[in-house]
Image (cartoon, helix red, strand yellow):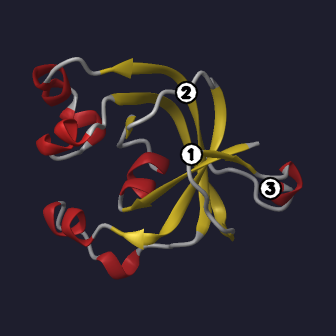
């Protein structure tokens, strides 16, 4: 199964279904279910902005799954700002090249996080890794 690594707190927000657009600089033709990996990096500035304790997050693990059903390309700042409540990013990210929004639904948390190394872009995880980790919800 494919997997995508995100910094915390965004991995948790996505896995809990609160974040429904994941911003990227690159386009993907992939559609379907994927695993959510919490990278070893924590965006402490975003944790402060959301008033979240950065020490509570699980890192370096697969924490859930979601379904990618489309990709939205942002053509201007206004479109980007309109979806801010779905991607939770700061306005300046648009100018940094984050012009693709991966549209996500059906997010689920794993009962127990699975330690796993992250990688860039979508990466393949052996399906057997999920055998003992039935998804919640």
Question: Disc 3 or 2, which lies upstream in sequence?
Answer: 2
* Drawn side of residue 60 relative to residue 127, left or right: left
Q: Nearer the viewer, mark 3 or mark 2?
A: 2
* Drawn side of residue 129 relative to residue 65, left or right: right
Residue 117 figure quarter: bottom right
Residue 101 figure quarter: top left
Residue 22 percent across, percent down from the top left: 40, 39
Q: Disc 2 designates what residue?
A: 28
Q: Are marks 2 and 1 in contact (CB under 8 Å)?
A: yes
Q: Disc 3 designates what residue?
A: 130
Residue 28 to residue 39: above or below? above
Residue at 39% in and 78% down: 56
Q: Could you say whether the residue bearing mark 1 is in a helix, strand or loop?
A: loop
User: Residue lying farthest bottom?
Assistant: 55
Q: Residues within 10 Å of mark 3 (few under 14, many from 20)?
A: some
Residue 11 figure quarter: bottom left
Nearer the observer, 115 or 110: 115
Q: Could you say whether the residue bearing mark 3 is in a helix, strand or loop?
A: helix
Q: Label 2, label 1: how many angstroms apart (C-alpha)? A: 9 Å
Q: Quadrant of the N terminus?
A: top right
Q: Disc 1 designates what residue?
A: 121
Q: Label 3, label 2: how many angstroms apart (C-alpha)? A: 24 Å
């Amino acid at each position: 199964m494919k997997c995508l690594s995100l910094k915390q707190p965004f991995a948790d927000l996505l896995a809990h279904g609160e974040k429904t657009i994941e911003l990227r600089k690159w386009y993907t033709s992939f559609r379907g279910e994927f695993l959510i990996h919490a990278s070893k990096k924590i965006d402490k500035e975003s944790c402060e902005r959301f008033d979240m304790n950065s020490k509570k997050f699980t890192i370096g693990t697969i924490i859930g799954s979601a379904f990618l059903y489309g990709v939205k390309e942002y053509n201007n700042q206004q479109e980007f700002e309109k979806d801010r409540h779905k991607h939770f990013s700061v306005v300046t990210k648009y100018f940094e090249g984050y012009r693709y929004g991966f549209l996500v639904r059906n997010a689920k948390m794993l009962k127990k996080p699975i330690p796993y190394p992250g990688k860039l872009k979508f990466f393949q995880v052996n399906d057997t890794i999920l055998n003992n980790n039935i998804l919640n919800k």
